[in-house]
Every structure is written in structure tokens, then in C-alpha cells.
Image (spheres, coloured by chain):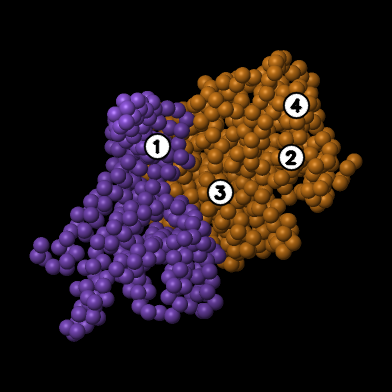
Chain colours: A orange, B purple
């Protein structure tokens, strides 16, 4: 059993990278169970070649293993695959152009809602999804939500993974405040934050125009109090007594934050945490790795723990992951080849090395991949393996749509919270304003 | 003999080819010479502008082409407090920043117009803030204004003048003033150097004559320098107002329009609605609504500041 895993390989540096078929890494053998399932008959078109877009990597091995996997597909099927890695801010717009012009890449791994916006321009992926789902123990809740067309069993997207932002906290500070871990109960959580503040080790959550962290916090706040932006019929439902209650809670909670969080962007909390100005925040796994890698900050990493966001009034921790969602366009001349490629990439021979190469940045969409060795590489990241198990998505409880994505990108929830935290609006006025703005996006 | 040679050889001008005739034709030349310029302008200026104006009257989103909705986008915007907030801040930002830039820029120009040691070197340094790409300026100010890691806060705390970090961009008014300060810092060199060029065209004999008449320094400025500078002041101010009003990078990089939309300029709000928010039609409508302000600013500079009697510093024509 190779305990010399990719971390050792990483230390060997770039020279090791070029070796071998799967990008040169010695991957741990994960025990991924499979069930019997018959793959769909995909007649790969003669002379097919594919172009794919996907978001750029978090870590270098991601790209290498992904390219190696595609090269293996070419070797087995003879289909040339050209993969372009696109900046995160650009992929949504490039997907839009591809869908609207009917030209360009055959398949795109986009984010979250993309397949739901261009449903009528996409190839149905149900056969592949059902086969892969059956073989690997079933798709997890978030994957089902993002993969299937609303209220149907038709798959229009194939989720490749998700990245979540749970609580990140300093064990020493939380323990000194009299808690083993941040509690699920909202009152106790507020008490913890007050004690941390009093100890000069305050919490801090982004309330600025930060797409990831700001929305993550605002969504948690509203959801954990039972509120939501739209109801299942796509009616705006943000102006509710639950929302007002959540905002009143925020007024108290905000007093415990480190000053300045209304101006925070997506990386502000990482910097503040590394500088020991903030002792409790929410973030993806990237922050922990950044601390762990830096010898000067390793002590902070040592003292760092991850737990799920407090459940509040719900029975599950509400957190929506950023989801990679693959789609195949109808304009592709080789739809079967494209489907075969996605299916190939989701098979364990390809998917597990890729998952491991990502070190935990992306979490799997399929049940059986929970057994991947990546989640044993460091006990502090094992929590991230459940990212796609949760039942919350951006735009909860409505259908996934352009409107929910736009409401997220336009910071409706975050600004509602920030307006109350800064004392600019009363909770009631802020909820009404959010309703007014959301109605603009959700008009039919 | 002369007769014979005349009759045997008559020089005839070669009949020009059709190409030659074509290039001799003036209308043709006019068209050919203008075509590249007109083509470039049409492709890169007129077409995007027309498309932007057209989009403002549709409900186009990034995901799908829209339909004509008339002035619906504008009626919505007129009822949208965030839009009016952006209008207010755009005007306020432009007004205060322009006053600041011209006050300080003129002062700097007057200083630099004196005989100083290392004059050319100083003039070169003055230009630096303007030469640096705006985004770099923005990032530098973003660090300077950071709620946790501001160098200014750090210094003030080290000097014992403050106990806590300065709130630069966490609340509405401090954020607005901080952005204006950054814009002024960046805009001064342009004004100072332009006005310096203007100052150097003023004939020294005017000052000598005034001094013989016993004019004070203030009188020399008021009755010679200022009126002589007005024409260039008008041009520089027009440019400055347009640049400031359409500013995007500083605000987007430092606050992204936050806290809670209090520092959105029309340009940043248009981008936010159109690209991240996906509402191309509404974003275009916001951009189009900048046009009247810009036209007004331009007309004001040309017709008010460039009037001849102002230039002469007197009321007679």
C-alpha cells in the first residue's frame, strides 16, 4: 500500500510531474465499491474530435491529472480532446456565448446553474447519469438538484464536484470560551461569539460584495432561521418573519465581529485569519492548506478546526456548495463522443486520481467516492467529503435558474444583511428592499 | 526642317489606364482615404454605441436575446433607489474630485512654474501617479484602505494617536470620501502638467508691466494668470469631468460599489447589473442614462468657460 502519496510526490517537485500515465503521481489505492451496471451504448461518431472548456485549477495537479485522463480517453477511443482552462469569472459568459451562438466547445464544465439556463440547447444526459449513479452508489443530494431539470428525472448536467465553505475556527480560542466546538444552537452560537469578542479574539464573516464568502454567510444566516429567497414555485419569499428574525439576530451577532467586515471581499477573511485578527470564520479548504504550507503559519493550521455551519432552527447544516456542472451542447457534431468522455472521466480509474489530485478542494458527487483516500489524507479536511450531501443550493427553495444565479451575483441577500448590520436599515425595511430587488430578477 | 519634324513626330500623351483615371478622380480619392477611418469608427465606436442604446430598450439578458420593451428599463430605474444613489454619487464624486483636482493641480502648477532646483526632475515625478496604470493605483489604495491592514491605521496606532483601525471603507460616508481622495491623488498630475503648459505660454512682459504698476501677487494672479489660463482650463476641465464621471476601475477595485451600494458610480452599477447580474438591457439603460450628464458637462465647459469675455477677465466684449 502506497502511503507515499501525492503529498510526497508534490515535494519532489515538478520533475516528478512529467512521469507516468496519470500525471506522474503515485495515487493511494482507494477502495471504491462499484455495483453492476450496464453502460449506455454510445456510438462514438467516426472521426470525432472534442473541444471542452472547464474552470482553471485550484492546484497544479488538478490540471495535469485532468489532461492525462483526457489523453487516456484519446488513446482508448481515438477521439482527440482539446481542453481549455478558463478563468472563473469568464466561464459563465463564455458558456452564454457558446449556447447563444451555437458554436464553440462541444462540452463545458461550468458552474452551478449553467445547464438550467440553456436547457433547450443541451443534450439529455440521463443515460450516462443513470449508469454512473447506479454503478457508484447513487448521486448525492446536491448533485441530483444541480443535475436534473427542475421537477423531472431528466439529467441535463453532470456534476463533477462541489466546494463548500464551513466554519473555520481556532480550537484554542473556542475552547477558552468554554465550548468544545461551535454549537448548533443559535443562542449558544451568539454567546460563543460574544465570549470570543470579549477575549479579543473576534469572529469575522464577510458582509461586503464578495460572491463566495458574502453570499455564503448571508445564505446561512437566513436559512438557519427558516427563511429563504424564493419558494418552490419561484415566488419571491424573502420578506418573511423568519428573515426579519434572522436580521435581528445579525444585529447582535455583528457587534461581535472584527470591525470592517462590511468592506470585506472574498480574500479578506483569509488574510485576517492568517494575521490572527479573526479566530472564527467560514471558508473553503484553501485557507487551511495555505496556512499548513507556510512554515510560519503552521502553528495556526495546527490549531485550526473545520465544522459545519450551525444548524440553527433546521435539522441539517445549511450550506450551498459551488458546483462543477458539465453539459453537452446540441450543436456538437459528436454528442455521443462528448457523453462518452464525461462518462469516462467519472469512472473510478479517472475520477479517483483526479479527486485525490485536488486534495479536497472539490468534493465528489457520488456516494461511493466517499471512500476515496483523499479524505484520509488529513483528518481536518474529512468534513469536506460531505459537501454534496446537503440539501441547500443557491436560490433555495426555488428552481435553479438564471434568476437565482443573478440574484446571488447581484448580492441581494448580502446587501440586505449588510444594510442591517451597518444600522442603515431596519430589519423590516431591509427585507422589503430585498424583496423589491428580487422581484425584478424573478419577474416572468 | 522644322515642318518636317513636326509632321513626322507628334508627342502624344499616353492615354491613362482606367486605374490611373480612377485615382485621379477626386470623389473616389475622398472615399478611399476616408474609408479606413470611417470603417474603424463605425466598427468600434458607432456600432457598440448604437447597440448599447438599442439594448437599453430591450430586456436582453446574458442567457437569451431580448425583446423590445420600450422604456420599461428606464421606468424601473427611476423607481430604483440604488440607481438614484448612483446618480447622486456620480455627480458628487465628479464635483468634489474635480474641485479638488483643480485646486491642488493649479497650486502645484504655480509652484512648478517658479524657478526651483531640479525643476525637470520634479516635473517628471509629479506625473508618476498619472502614469501608473489605474488598476495598480486602485490596488495600492485598496491596501491603504484595508479595514485590517491599512498602513495609515498602523502608523496612527504606532504613534499612539489612535487605538483602533481607521474606518475607511466600512461605512458609507468614509468610503465615499476615501474614493474621492484616491481619485484626486490620481488626477492631480494631469491637471498640473496641463496647466503648467498653459502657464508657460503667458508672456513674462505682462507680469513685468503689472509689477511696474505695483500689482500685488494676488492681483497678478487674478488679472493676468487666471484669465490667460481660462481657455486651457476649460479644455482640461472638460476632459477631467468626463474621465471622473465615467470612472470605473478605482471604485470597482476598492469597494465594488459597497458598503451596501453606497459608492456605486453609474459606470460600476451598469457593469454590476449587466455582467455579473446578467441583465444586459438594464445595464445598458444605466450606461445610456450617463449620456445626458456628459453632454451637459461638455456643453457647460465649452460655452460657459470658453466665453471670450471670461477669458479677458472683464465684462465688456
Position in image of residue A119 (x %, y %): 53, 23
Which residue matches tag 2? A64
Going from N to C along the chain, the mark reached first, 2 or 4, is 2
Q: Is residue B256 visible?
A: yes
Residue B64, quarter of picture: top left
Which residue matches tag 1? B36
Side of A213 relative to A71 (left or right): left
Going from N to C along the chain, the mark reached first, 3 or 2, is 2
Going from N to C along the chain, the mark reached first, 4 or 3, is 4
SS for tag 4?
helix
| Dot 3 and dot 2 within a common chain | yes
Residue A5, quarter of picture: top right
| Dot 4 and dot 3 within a common chain | yes
Decide which of A364, A358 is in the foreground and name it: A358
SS for tag 3?
helix
Which residue matches tag 3? A213
Position in image of residue A13 (x %, y %): 79, 50
Label 1 near label 2: C-beta < 8 Å? Answer: no
Question: Which residue is situated farthest in the left direction here?
Answer: B316
Side of A385 relative to A216 (left or right): right
Q: Quadrant of the N terminus of chain A?
A: top right
> Residue under mark 4: which chain is it in?
A
| Dot 2 and dot 1 within a common chain | no
SS for tag 1?
helix
Side of A354 relative to B284 (left or right): right
Amino acid at each position: 500500500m502506497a502511503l507515499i502519496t501525492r503529498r510526497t510526490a508534490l515535494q519532489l517537485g515538478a520533475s516528478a510531474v512529467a512521469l507516468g500515465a496519470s500525471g506522474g503521481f503515485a495515487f493511494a489505492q482507494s477502495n471504491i465499491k462499484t455495483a453492476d451496471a450496464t453502460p449506455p451504448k454510445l456510438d462514438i461518431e467516426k472521426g470525432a474530435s472534442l473541444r471542452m472548456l472547464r474552470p482553471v485549477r485550484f492546484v497544479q495537479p488538478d490540471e495535469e491529472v485532468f489532461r492525462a485522463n483526457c489523453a487516456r480517453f484519446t488513446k482508448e477511443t481515438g477521439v482527440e480532446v482539446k481542453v481549455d482552462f478558463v478563468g472563473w469569472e469568464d466561464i459563465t459568459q463564455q458558456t452564454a456565448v457558446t449556447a447563444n451562438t451555437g458554436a464553440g466547445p462541444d462540452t463545458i464544465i461550468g458552474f452551478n446553474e449553467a445547464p438550467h439556463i440553456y436547457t433547450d440547447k443541451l443534450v439529455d444526459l440521463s443515460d450516462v447519469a443513470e449508469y454512473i449513479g447506479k454503478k457508484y452508489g447513487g448521486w448525492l443530494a446536491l448533485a441530483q438538484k444541480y443535475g436534473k431539470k427542475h421537477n423531472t428525472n431528466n439529467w441535463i448536467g453532470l456534476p463533477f464536484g462541489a466546494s463548500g465553505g464551513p466554519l473555520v475556527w481556532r480550537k484554542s480560542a473556542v475552547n477558552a470560551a468554554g465550548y468544545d466546538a461551535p454549537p448548533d444552537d443559535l443562542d449558544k452560537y451568539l454567546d460563543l461569539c460574544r465570549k470570543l469578542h470579549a477575549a479579543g479574539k473576534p469572529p469575522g464573516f464577510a458582509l461586503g460584495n464578495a460572491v463566495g464568502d458574502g453570499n455564503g454567510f448571508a445564505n446561512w444566516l437566513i436559512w438557519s432561521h427558516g427563511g429563504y429567497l424564493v419558494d418552490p414555485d419561484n415566488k419571491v419569499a424573502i420578506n418573511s418573519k423568519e428573515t426579519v428574525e434572522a436580521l435581528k439576530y445579525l444585529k447582535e451577532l455583528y457587534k461581535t465581529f472584527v470591525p470592517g467586515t462590511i468592506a470585506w471581499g472574498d480574500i479578506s477573511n483569509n488574510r485576517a485569519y492568517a494575521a490572527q485578527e479573526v479566530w472564527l470564520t467560514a471558508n473553503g479548504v484553501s485557507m487551511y492548506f495555505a496556512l499548513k504550507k507556510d512554515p510560519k503559519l503552521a502553528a495556526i493550521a495546527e490549531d485550526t478546526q473545520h465544522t459545519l455551519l450551525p444548524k440553527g432552527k433546521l435539522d441539517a447544516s445549511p450550506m450551498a456548495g459551488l458546483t462543477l456542472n458539465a453539459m453537452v451542447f446540441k450543436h456538437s457534431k459528436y454528442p455521443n463522443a462528448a457523453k462518452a468522455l464525461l462518462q469516462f472521466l467519472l469512472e473510478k480509474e479517472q475520477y479517483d486520481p483526479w479527486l485525490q489530485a485536488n486534495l479536497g478542494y472539490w468534493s465528489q458527487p457520488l456516494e461511493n467516492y466517499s471512500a476515496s483516500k483523499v479524505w484520509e489524507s488529513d483528518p481536518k479536511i474529512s468534513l469536506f467529503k460531505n459537501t454534496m450531501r446537503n440539501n441547500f443550493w443557491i436560490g433555495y427553495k426555488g428552481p435553479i435558474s438564471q434568476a437565482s444565479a443573478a440574484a446571488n451575483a447581484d448580492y441581494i441577500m448580502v446587501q440586505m444583511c449588510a444594510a442591517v448590520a451597518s444600522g442603515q436599515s431596519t430589519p423590516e425595511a431591509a427585507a422589503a428592499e430585498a424583496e423589491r430587488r428580487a422581484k425584478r430578477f424573478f419577474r416572468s | 526642317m522644322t515642318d518636317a519634324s513636326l509632321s513626322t513626330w507628334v508627342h502624344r500623351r499616353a492615354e491613362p489606364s482606367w486605374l490611373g483615371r480612377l485615382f485621379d478622380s477626386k470623389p473616389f480619392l475622398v472615399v478611399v482615404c476616408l474609408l479606413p477611418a470611417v470603417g474603424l469608427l463605425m466598427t468600434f465606436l458607432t456600432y457598440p454605441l448604437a447597440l448599447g442604446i438599442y439594448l437599453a430598450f430591450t430586456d436582453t439578458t446574458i442567457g437569451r436575446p431580448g425583446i423590445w420593451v420600450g422604456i420599461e428599463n428606464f421606468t424601473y430605474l427611476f423607481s430604483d433607489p440604488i440607481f438614484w444613489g448612483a446618480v447622486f454619487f456620480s455627480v458628487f464624486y465628479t464635483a468634489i474630485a474635480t474641485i479638488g483636482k483643480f485646486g491642488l493641480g493649479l497650486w502645484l502648477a504655480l509652484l512648478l512654474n517658479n524657478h526651483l532646483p531640479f525643476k525637470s526632475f520634479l516635473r517628471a515625478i509629479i506625473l508618476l501617479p498619472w502614469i501608473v496604470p489605474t488598476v495598480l493605483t486602485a490596488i495600492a489604495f485598496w491596501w491603504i484602505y484595508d479595514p485590517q491592514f491599512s498602513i495609515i491605521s498602523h502608523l496612527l496606532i504606532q504613534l499612539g494617536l489612535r487605538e483602533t483601525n481607521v474606518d475607511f471603507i466600512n461605512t458609507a460616508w468614509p468610503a465615499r470620501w476615501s474614493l474621492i481622495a484616491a481619485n484626486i491623488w490620481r488626477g492631480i498630475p494631469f491637471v498640473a502638467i496641463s496647466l503648467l503648459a498653459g502657464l508657460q505660454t503667458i508672456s513674462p512682459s505682462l507680469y513685468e508691466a503689472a509689477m511696474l504698476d505695483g500689482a500685488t501677487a494676488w492681483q497678478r494672479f487674478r488679472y493676468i494668470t487666471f484669465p490667460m489660463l481660462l481657455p486651457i482650463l476649460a479644455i482640461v476641465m472638460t476632459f477631467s469631468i468626463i474621465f471622473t464621471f465615467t470612472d470605473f476601475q478605482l471604485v470597482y477595485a476598492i469597494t465594488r460599489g459597497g458598503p451596501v451600494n453606497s459608492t456605486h458610480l453609474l459606470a460600476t452599477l451598469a457593469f454590476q447589473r449587466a455582467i455579473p447580474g446578467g441583465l444586459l438591457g438594464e445595464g445598458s439603460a444605466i450606461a445610456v442614462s450617463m449620456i445626458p450628464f456628459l453632454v451637459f458637462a461638455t456643453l457647460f465647459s465649452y460655452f460657459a468657460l470658453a466665453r471670450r469675455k471670461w477669458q479677458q477677465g472683464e465684462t465688456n466684449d
